[in-house]
Amino acid sequence: MAEIVAFLGMGGTIAGTAQSADDNVGYTAAQLGVQNLLQSVPGLTRILGARQALAEQVCQIDSKDLMHADWAALLGRLKHNLARPDVRAVVITHGTDTLEETAYFLSRALAPELLAHKPVVLTCAMRPASSLNPDGPGNLADAATLAVWPGARGVLVVCGGKIHGAAQVQKVHPYRVDAFDSGEAGPLGLVEEGRVRLLADFPRADHGQAAVDVEALQAKGWPRVEILLSHAGAGGGLLRALLREPEGEAPLRGIVVAGTGNGTIHREMDAGLLLAQARGVRVVRVSRCAYGQVVGDAPEAVAFSKYALSAVKARIALMLDIASEA
């Protein structure tokens, strides 16, 4: 039985088209199916060797518009494919805008045993498929190379020849094709001329981490967690609006505040957050700095928990933590 590499399409710029080949910003995302994308990859048959490519369109969406239901659909297809003994790896084509969120969610939501010996590789593009110089085919070739590389495992991201881990990767540039960075940790490795050069080990499965019951989450509703940014002149008006819970909105369950510097919070915002916490809303603080994480506890911020994550990933972590406690 031949091994399979499953390619799951989610849309994004990699599948986008514009009316002109020299237009790299005025395109419409998510226009091509993943099967079309595979046909554009030079040497894919050589990369896969005796393995077969299996293409499946999960969503067709601009990733800025991604919803929790799209994550649920993707997670379901990933569980199905990773559980198959003939599937060697899964490659996901995804938009860049929320790729880091999807990667982190999958690293938290998938059962550790599914990732212990198989990789889930997300890739993307910063130029549409119709561009004079599309980067999608090269990124997809690199993702396929990584997917079949001996020892590859865990949730990984490939873009611009660099391999990133799900916990560290962030989009750091709105236009450049090398748009992702892993901060102080640096990339896990590089894909160079069809070969992987590792700079650090692949992530190991955390067998103490429970898989997420996404069906139950969908049924009872994902906990509503919002992100606030502390800044000069920050007040409590936005926070008070969040606490009013307009009709039709789910109750607020958590707040991630991206604090200045070492996770510090403006005194007027801090007062509102204490009120929210007293009402049962979980509050987590992180740093809004591009590098580093909150170290120690500033006297004015000890009342709140802290996560060593970016704000968007801390939101996912808090959401899943709240759901697991319900």
Image (cartoon, rainbow, N blue to C red):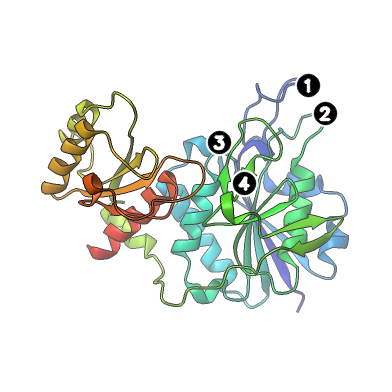
**What amino acid is found at the position of numbered circle 1 in the picture?**
Asp
Q: Are marks 2 and 3 in contact (CB under 8 Å)?
A: no
Element at label 2: loop
Side of 14 where 301 appears, left or right: left
Residue 168 falls in which quadrant of the image?
Answer: bottom right
3 vs 1, front mark: 1
Residues packed near mark 4 inside 10 Å, few (<14), some (14 to 19) or many (20 plus): many
Reading the image, the residue beneath label 4 is 181
Residue 325, image x, y percentages:
24, 64
Element at label 3: loop
Side of 129 where 13 appears, left or right: left
Instruction: Name the foreground residue: 74 vs 118.
Output: 118
Q: Earlier in the sequence, mark 2 or mark 3?
A: 3
2 vs 3, front mark: 2
**What amino acid is found at the position of numbered circle 4 in the picture?**
Asp
- Measured Cα–Cα span from mark 2 to mark 1: 6 Å
Reading the image, the residue beneath label 2 is 132
Element at label 4: strand
Residue lying at the far front in this picture: please name it.
299
Element at label 1: loop
Residue 185, image x, y percentages:
59, 56
Reading the image, the residue beneath label 3 is 62
Count of labels in the image:
4
